[in-house]
């Protein structure tokens, strides 16, 4: 990697309050001149700038106008699953607030808005037996208003809210869910595809599978160690591939859109220079990102390392075959190459070291023989899992370029949370820490784009506004806009970060001063 161009000392004045002392660096902790200097310059002229949300996190209206229950309605209504038993019954009330939401998007001057469809709002029992027209109407109205404002929709089909009726039949453990997902995707392409050109099948399968089926921290809250996650992922990958083929076979020619998938990855750095720690970072990436990226982008099959490790562990456990399922030859052919673009969510970096696990219990973590953590001197956020490490973002992008042949990329999420438990609204509006996060990460993205030749087409900030942060309820705030959840009108107020982000969008980066 080349090093970044050095920032001129005549840094634009608006940016200065957000920089560390020397005015070349954002964080006091990261001051390596070749690695951490802010890069000035512009993104390509067609670069997509946007913000992201997800249906369950913002819509509310959980049982209105014929919507069926999703696993998140059921999970959050059960005592003890979510912080202070918060739920998304009302959330940001976006189901009733298209005007307010579009107003914010226009103020920001984004070119794109990434949101998700609630499967159970469109198909109350998950199947195409009954189509809920009011659900489709809501999304049509939103999309029409976006297009009027010259904002392109980027639509996620599945952001974690499976219809409960399908969960009752086994959810993603049951391979008939693949057929139901494909029927749902087909309906959405048919009904909305004349206006939507960017589709995302799944948001972060890694998260909803790991946390939903093994740790139990996300819906449906199951704690099945060792085998279920791999079987569920197998079905999700097949469902993705099937929906991509449906688009290609039936809609692509007429609608001219693109279908991708959004994957999340941390960047791992070795705890030491030892060979075993360095190898552990490779395992970390292959188990987190490669699990999905390798079959879809490379050859229709899991990464070799993953196949070897899970097989070896399975044998040690006395099993005759691997807990990791296998793709047939035909399935490989059907899976390979099924992403027109890769959506990437990046939040943080982890320190990783080799750590052998005993043969039992069997588990996804145990299969990897490693431990990970955050360095304690890295900057903090409102959440223990999120520490800003901007340079990890560039390294991850470079790794993806090298490993997967420089696929077209959209950053579909990147963002920072502060604590929402603190009721001090004024402090929440002056969110300088979030501004630092965005400036530093967008600068690293600019390096990836301009210096490393990564084919990045756009950037979506997470999130447009504060919203229901899954099991953490409303205790973390990720928004560019503040939402007052104590007020039944859910008023939205721009934070400092909204103004700064809009400025970056209008400048298309960080241009040098004239
Ligand atoms: C994404 O997940 C999601 O796509 C988005 O919906 C979400 O709002 C956003 O990022 C912010 O989280 O006990 O602290 O380990 C961890 C990113 C909960 C990954 C944190 C939820 C990481 C998923 C619980 N995780 N997040 S614990």
Image (cartoon, rainbow, N blue to C red):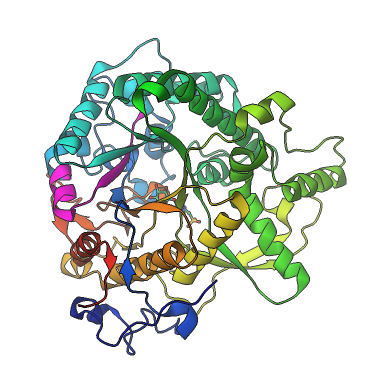
Question: Percent position (x, y) of residue 98?
Answer: 16, 37
Judging depth in this view, the residue of 325 and 394 nearest the camera is 394
Question: Percent position (x, y) of residue 175?
Answer: 60, 22
Provide the residue span drawn in magenta. 101-118
Question: Against 170, is 365 above or below?
Answer: below
Question: Against 259, is 124 above or below?
Answer: above
> In which quarter of the view is residue 513 placed?
bottom left
> In which quarter of the view is residue 129 placed?
top left
Question: Against 181, is 417 above or below?
Answer: below
Question: Is residue 111 found inside the magenta-colored segment of the image?
Answer: yes
Q: How many marks?
A: 0
What residue is drawn where x is 37% and y is 71%?
A: 440
Q: Is residue 133 left or right of residue 308?
A: left
Quadrant, the C terminus? bottom left
Task: Tell me if I can see residue 124 in this picture.
Answer: no
What residue is drawn where x is 27% and y is 42%?
A: 58
Quadrant, the N terminus? bottom right
Question: Is residue 508 found inside the magenta-colored segment of the image?
Answer: no
Q: Looking at this rendering, what residue extends furthest in the top direction? A: 129
Judging depth in this view, the residue of 86 and 504 nearest the camera is 504
What residue is drawn where x is 35% and y is 68%?
A: 437
Question: Percent position (x, y) of residue 55?
Answer: 32, 37
Judging depth in this view, the residue of 246 and 81 nearest the camera is 246
> In which quarter of the view is residue 291 placed?
top right
Task: Tell me if I can see residue 310 in this picture.
Answer: yes
């Amino acid at each position: 990697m080349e090093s970044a161009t050095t920032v001129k000392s005549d840094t634009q004045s608006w940016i200065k309050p957000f920089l560390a002392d020397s005015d070349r660096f954002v964080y006091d902790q990261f001051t390596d001149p070749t690695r951490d200097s802010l890069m000035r310059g512009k993104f390509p002229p067609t670069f997509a700038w946007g913000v992201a949300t997800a249906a369950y996190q913002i819509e509310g209206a959980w049982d209105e106008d014929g919507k069926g229950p999703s696993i998140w309605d059921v999970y959050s209504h059960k005592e003890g699953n979510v912080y202070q038993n918060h739920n998304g019954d009302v959330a940001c009330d976006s189901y009733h607030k298209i005007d307010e939401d579009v107003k914010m998007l226009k103020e920001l001057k984004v070119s794109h808005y990434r949101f998700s469809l609630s499967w159970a709002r469109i198909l109350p029992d998950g199947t195409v037996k009954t189509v809920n027209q009011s659900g489709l109407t809501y999304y049509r109205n939103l999309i029409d208003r976006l297009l009027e404002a010259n904002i392109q929709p980027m639509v996620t089909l599945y952001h974690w809210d499976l219809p409960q009726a399908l969960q009752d039949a086994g959810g993603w453990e049951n391979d008939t869910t693949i057929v139901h997902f494909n029927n749902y995707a087909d309906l959405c392409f048919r009904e909305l595809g004349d206006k939507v050109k960017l589709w995302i099948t799944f948001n972060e399968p890694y998260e909803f599978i790991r946390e939903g089926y093994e740790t139990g921290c996300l819906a449906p809250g199951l704690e099945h160690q060792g085998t279920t996650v791999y079987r569920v992922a197998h079905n999700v990958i097949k469902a993705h591939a099937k929906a991509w083929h449906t688009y290609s076979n039936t809609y692509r020619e007429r609608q001219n859109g693109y279908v991708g998938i959004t994957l999340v990855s941390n960047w791992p750095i070795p705890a030491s220079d030892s060979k075993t720690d360095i190898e552990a970072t490779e395992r970390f990436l292959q188990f987190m990102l490669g699990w999905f990226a390798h079959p879809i982008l490379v050859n229709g099959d899991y990464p070799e390392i993953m196949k070897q490790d899970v097989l070896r562990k399975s044998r040690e456990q006395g099993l005759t075959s691997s807990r990791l399922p296998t793709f047939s030859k035909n399935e490989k052919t059907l899976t390979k190459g099924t992403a027109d673009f890769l959506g990437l969510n990046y939040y943080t970096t982890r320190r990783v070291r080799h750590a052998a696990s005993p043969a039992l219990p069997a588990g996804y973590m145990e299969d990897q023989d490693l431990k990970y953590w955050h360095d304690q001197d890295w900057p903090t956020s409102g959440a223990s899992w999120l520490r800003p490490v901007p340079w990890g973002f560039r390294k991850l992008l470079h790794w993806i370029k090298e490993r997967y042949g420089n696929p077209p990329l959209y950053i579909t999420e990147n963002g920072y949370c502060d604590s929402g438990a603190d009721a001090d609204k004024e402090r929440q509006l002056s969110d300088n820490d979030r501004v630092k996060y965005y400036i530093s990460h967008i600068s690293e993205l600019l390096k990836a784009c301009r210096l490393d030749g990564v084919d990045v087409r756009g950037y979506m900030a997470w999130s447009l506004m504060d919203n229901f942060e899954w099991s953490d309820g409303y205790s973390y705030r990720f928004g560019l806009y503040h939402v007052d959840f104590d007020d039944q009108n859910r008023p939205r107020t721009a934070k400092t970060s909204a103004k700064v982000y809009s400025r970056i969008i209008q400048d298309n980066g960080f241009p040098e001063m004239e």
